[in-house]
Image (spheres, rainbow, N blue to C red):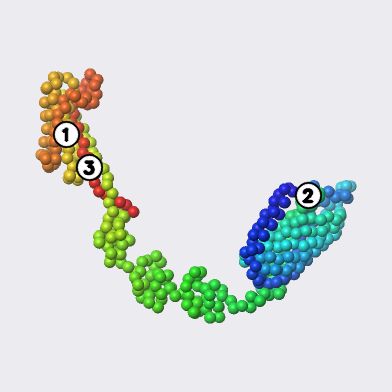
Amino acid sequence: MKKHFKLAALSLAVLSSTAFAQDSSEPEYKSWFGASGMYYNTDVARPFADGVVDDNGQGVSLEYGFRFTQSWAARVEFTALQLDYTTNANTSADDEGEMTGVDVMYFMPDDQWYLFGGVKRQAVLESTTLGNIGIGKHWDLFENAKVITEIATYHDFGEDYNDYSVKVGIAIPFGKSSTSSAPKDADNDGVIDSVDQCPMTPAGVRVDATGCSVDNDNDGVLNSVDQCPNTPAGTAVDAKGCALKDADNDGVVDSKDMCPDTAAGVKVDAKGCTVFDEETVEITLRVLFDNESSVVKAPRDPEISEFAEFMKQYTNTTAVIEGHTSAPGSEAYNMDLSEDRAASFKEVMVDMYDIDASRLETVGYGETRLLDTAKNAEAHRVNRRISVTVKDTVKVPEEK
């Protein structure tokens, strides 16, 4: 617990010393007087000569504070304190005394909250000196009154125990700083409120001498020359503040678009023309034949139709139709049969699907390229075939 208290105190010191160089401006008010009610809890390990104190003390505090800058302040505090305790004879009792001390205080920007640390002398049951740190806030109640809320912890370095307190009260500020009488500029646009005809201008907006925006639609064209004063946010505009036309919505205005009908969703270059990428397309087909046959049994098979459609779509492609046989039979017979099978499939492509014969080449391999070398009916079935592969490299539009 002692280690944690020292760490918190060190953090307060580092934060305060760093912030000191950042804010030396004059505060809104110079001093305050406060009165608060306090709940005080003692450490169960805190030793007392006459009894063990329970965690239910209370008091009334008076304080006077002075602000050196917007961030830095100090205060003196007096607390009339009563601690309830249980005697060695197990009877309830209380004792009254006081606690006095001083604190150094650091207020965060805009008085969001403050940190404080100091020394207190406590005289209840017995006298002791305590170090304390805490956090609090002055809440605006009225123009000349603030609500005080604080929580603090106290440490006796000699006895090594920690108490804590919670405080709620009222503070009356006085001594307004000289800057408080300066002309106000509520929206911080550089035009004082008495002259500002647009008092709620958003932060960062350029304004004229009357405090009103010089570019109402924020399109970069001043109101004085903007012929389209209500352009939607993010719209590209011309020198007159009017939207540049882009008929195909590709991000290139019509005046610079050399490809005015670009398809939706594709990437374009600076001239508005589609950016293409290369892509490889490929299809492979295998057709099986009956034993010692070169007849294509199902020329309208969906896979054959799909192959034909592929060749029609990619008109620059050519294909080599490879004929094959199973192992039974002589090599010469099988070579002739494989060539017949390739030629038969070419005939189907040309006659039934209108594929240009010049795009198709045939070759027979006989039994030299068996798919399955086993000597059974299934192996023979898959080896009686033609196979053909078509591949092409095409240009396709890149997507955005």
**Amino acid beneath label 1:** Ile
Q: Earlier in the sequence, mark 3 or mark 1?
A: 1
Work out how far the residue at label 1 is from the one at label 2, CA to CA, in angstroms: 95 Å
The one of 188 and 328 positioned closer to us in this rendering: 188
Query: Residue sitting at 69 percent across and 54 percent down?
Result: 10
Q: Which residue is mark 1?
A: 321
Work out how far the residue at label 3 is from the one at label 1, CA to CA, in angstroms: 16 Å
Q: Residue 392 shows which numbered tag?
A: 3
**Amino acid beneath label 3:** Asp
**Residue 137 in view here:** no
**Residue 286 in the image: x percent, y percent?**
21, 32
Relative height, residue 57 to residue 382 (above, below): below
Query: Residue sitting at 75 percent across and 56 percent down?
Result: 132
Where does the C terminus fall, quadrant-wise? bottom left
Q: Residue furthest bottom?
A: 195
Find numbered disc 2 in the image and state the secondary structure of the residue it sits on.
strand
Work out how far the residue at label 2 is from the one at label 3, CA to CA, in angstroms: 84 Å
**Residue 179 in the image: x percent, y percent?**
64, 75
Relative height, residue 291 to residue 225 (above, below): above
Q: Which residue is mark 2?
A: 161
Relative height, residue 42 to residue 26 (above, below): above
**Amino acid beneath label 2:** Tyr
Residue 234 quadrant:
bottom left
